[in-house]
Amino acid sequence: MTTTATYTIKGMTCGHCVNAVSTELSGLPGVNDVRVDLAAGTATVTSDRPLDPQAVREAVDEAGYEMSQA
Ligand SMILES: [Cu+2]
């Protein structure tokens, strides 16, 4: 079952930030598509199954940013 979720991410300021977040989130198991909206400060992730929020948080952290409480 395909699932889409949108996360709010703090600290993204440019295309480099978008790439960093996209790369990390794309690496999570089951993720098919990541769309980062820099202006809105959000990442919309499409995946095969619901993602573990903790795993998403860690991926965002790994990229150097902070996921806001959903
Ligand atoms: Cu940047």
Image (cartoon, helix red, strand yellow):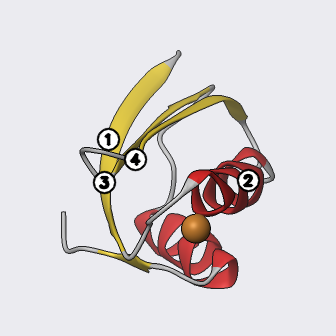
Dot 4: what SS? loop
Q: Amino acid at mark 1?
A: Thr
CB contact under 8 Å: marks 3 and 1:
no
| Residue 28: numbered disc | 2
| Residue 41: numbered disc | 3
Q: Amino acid at mark 2?
A: Leu
Vertical side of 55 occupied by 23: above or below: above
- The front one of 61 and 51 is 61
Vertical side of 60 occupied by 4: above or below: above
Q: Looking at the figure, which quarter contains the C terminus?
A: bottom left
Task: Answer yes or no: disc 3 within 8 Å of ligand 1.
Answer: no
Task: Answer yes or no: disc 2 within 8 Å of ligand 1.
Answer: no
Q: Tag 2: Cα neighbours inside 10 Å, few (<14), some, or many (≥20)?
A: some
Classify residue 38 as left or right of residue 39. Answer: right
Q: Tag 4: Cα neighbours inside 10 Å, few (<14), some, or many (≥20)?
A: some
Q: CA distance from mark 2 to mark 4?
A: 20 Å
Q: CA distance from mark 4 to mark 1?
A: 13 Å
Q: CA distance from mark 3 to mark 1?
A: 10 Å
Mark 4 or 1, nearer chain start? 1
CB contact under 8 Å: marks 2 and 3:
no
Mark 2 or 3, nearer chain start? 2
Classify residue 68 as left or right of residue 24. Answer: left
| Residue 38: numbered disc | 4
Vertical side of 49 occupied by 66: above or below: below
- Furthest residue in direction left, as rendered: 70
Mark 3 or 1, nearer chain start? 1
Residue at 40% across, 47% down = 38
